[in-house]
Image: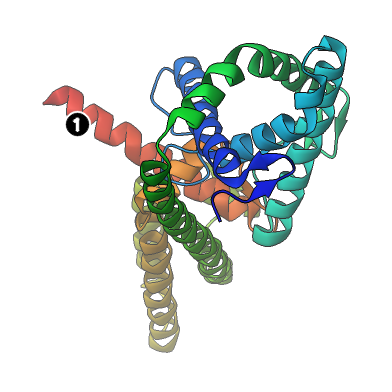
Amino acid sequence: MWTTEVLGFPFFELYAFFIIYSFLGWALESLFVSVSNGTWVNRGFISGPFCPIYGTGAVLVIVGLTPALENTLWLFCGGVAIATIVEYVISFLLEKIFHATWWDYSQMRFNLKGRICLLRSLEWGGLTVIMMRIVQPPIQRFVQWIPSAIGEFVGVLLLIYLISDASVTVMNIFQMKEKMARLGEATLALREKMESVKLFDAKKELLDYFETLPMAEAMVKLKEKMEERSEQMMQFKAEEQLRFEYILSEMKEKLESRDGILKKNNITERRLTRAFPRLSFKKYNEEFAVFKREISNKKKIEKKKGYRK
């Protein structure tokens, strides 16, 4: 299998190029974003140090543009075309599979559905020229130097790792999407209960409660409102008090359910929200915004505790 020729290249070489450029793409993008944010950000789709979209683009560029190596204009234009198509197709597939938007160029000029934009495409063209003229020659020599037995052994290990890592990531994304659905249901049920007992004076105040307050503060505020309303109900007859107390107990259950969903976030979910700040689920935009804010607030609290120590 490793020695089979694919479009004029041994399969092992193409696979090795995919691995190497997936790592280099991950390293460069993670470094750039980390420096911009002032904190480390793993920009990979999967947990490990690889960005398969870069590896895929690089392999297609190598296969398609090696014959045009001496023509800078062809390299540039070919790089623009290949990278743009790859970025658009990957964005489209991710949206269809996960019903989520992973990156969005809508704010940039000359974009197409937010998936690609002219500036990024031109950057890919420039990077293609640099890659093919400067980066690829030593990498190709290195790959051809690797002893076949060692290369095949490491290749199998990396393949198993990539499949496992991708499987875990995909599973976590679907779980996160399901969590957003449960969060939406819990929030809707709680809102309905709050409206039924007029816990807030106006609907806007109720919405602000859900959309602006950190969960810890929201819990305190809601409990205060519930106690205040409970005192007001003391003057009503017994059956009204019982009805109100029943509704309050239901509200507490819904609130605890919502709180539990928000607090249970794993390392993959936290990593993805940092790696893709524009990530949003089409049906659960509001819920995911609350979820991301809760993760951010939790991180700030942990930092403050660290400083105090």
Is 272 rendered above or below residue 308?
below
Residue 14 picture location, percent across and down: 60, 40
Mark 1, residue position: 305
User: Residue 219 lies in what quarter of the image?
Assistant: bottom left
Q: In this view of the protein, which residue sits in the foreground, 209 or 31?
A: 31
Going 77% across and 46% down the picture, which residue do you hit?
A: 89
Going 69% across and 58% down the picture, which residue do you hit?
A: 99
Residue 166 picture location, percent across and down: 49, 55
The N terminus: image quadrant? bottom right
Q: In this view of the protein, which residue sits in the foreground, 92 or 259?
A: 92
Residue 255 picture location, percent across and down: 41, 65
Going 39% across and 22% down the picture, which residue do you hit?
A: 39
Q: In this view of the protein, which residue sits in the foreground, 137 or 272?
A: 137
User: Residue 164 lies in what quarter of the image?
Assistant: bottom left
The C terminus: image quadrant? top left
Is 294 rendered above or below residue 57?
below
Is 172 rendered above or below residue 246?
above
Q: In the rendered structure, which amino acid carries the disc numbered 1? A: Lys
Residue 162 picture location, percent across and down: 46, 51
Under circle 1, the secondary element is: helix
Q: In this view, does 109 lie to the left or right of 277?
A: right
